[in-house]
Amino acid sequence: MSEPRYWENYTVGDRFPLGSTSFTEQEIVDFARQFDPQSFHVDRQAAAGSMFGGIIASGWHVASKLMRLFVDNYLDTRTALGSPGVDELRWLKPVRPGDTLTAWVECAAKVPSRSKPHFGVIHEHWTATNQKGEVVMTAKGMGMVKRKPA
């Protein structure tokens, strides 16, 4: 994008594609060993006997890779001011080795800041589906964005 995307440029209901990302068993295991070493993330044999029937990605791994897509394909670093948090994060289906997720973000609402008139808040809904079209993750969060200079 050539022009900065300010708070005023967001329209409630607009959806923005974030792109796609794939998962390998090795990266699932590597991430989980470091951050979420539960057996169904790191041990093929234990995972086979679990309720998942095999290795699955940590939900935190899924969220991290979607955050990377968000930064690479959506976030305007000229106007983004960070986030005050996430209101809801749901992992609805397991993500398995070989899965490719496609994600998008929707502008669900926008609110001007009452205390800091130089920015506003965008309420965003994230959705990610696997290659079968199944929704695997949703999130509701907020982003602070600069307002257009007067």
Image: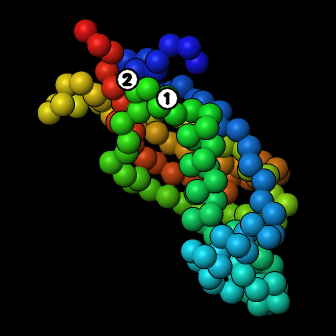
Q: Which mark is residue 76?
A: 1
Where, quadrant-wise, is the N terminus in this rendering? Answer: top right
Q: Is residue 55 above or below residue 65?
A: below
CA distance for labels 1 and 2: 11 Å
Which residue is drawn at the image coordinates 56% and 49% (left, top)? 67
Vertically, is 100 above or below 142?
Answer: below
**Which is nearer the eye, 109 or 57?**
57
Q: Residue at x 56, y 40 (%)?
A: 71
Residue 109: quadrant of the picture: top left
Q: Residue at x 70, y 73 (%)?
A: 30
Q: Dividing the image into 4 quarters, which one contains the C terminus?
A: top left
Element under disc 2: helix
Quarter of image, res 87: bottom left
- Kindly give the residue lying farthest to the right in the view shown: 98
Provide residue 55's location: percent of width, then percent of height: 77, 76
Q: Is residue 8 above or below residue 53?
A: above
Image disc number at residue 7:
2
Residues under numbered marks 1 and 2 in contact, where contact means CB atoms less than 8 Å apart: no
Which tag is nearer the camera, tag 1 or tag 2? 1
The extreme top residue here reads 150
Element on which disc 1 rests = loop
Residue 147 on image: x %, y %: 31, 21
Give whichever of discs 1 and 2 has the lower sequence position.
2
Dot 2 alpha-carbon crowd within 10 angstroms: few under 14, some 14 to 19, many 20 or more: many
Coloring scheme used: rainbow
Vertical order, 45 against 71 (above or below): below
User: Left or right: 122 with respect to 45?
Assistant: left
Which label is found at residue 17?
none
The x, y position of residue 64, in whole percent, is 58, 56
The kind of residue tagged 1 is: Asp
Q: Is residue 127 visible?
A: no
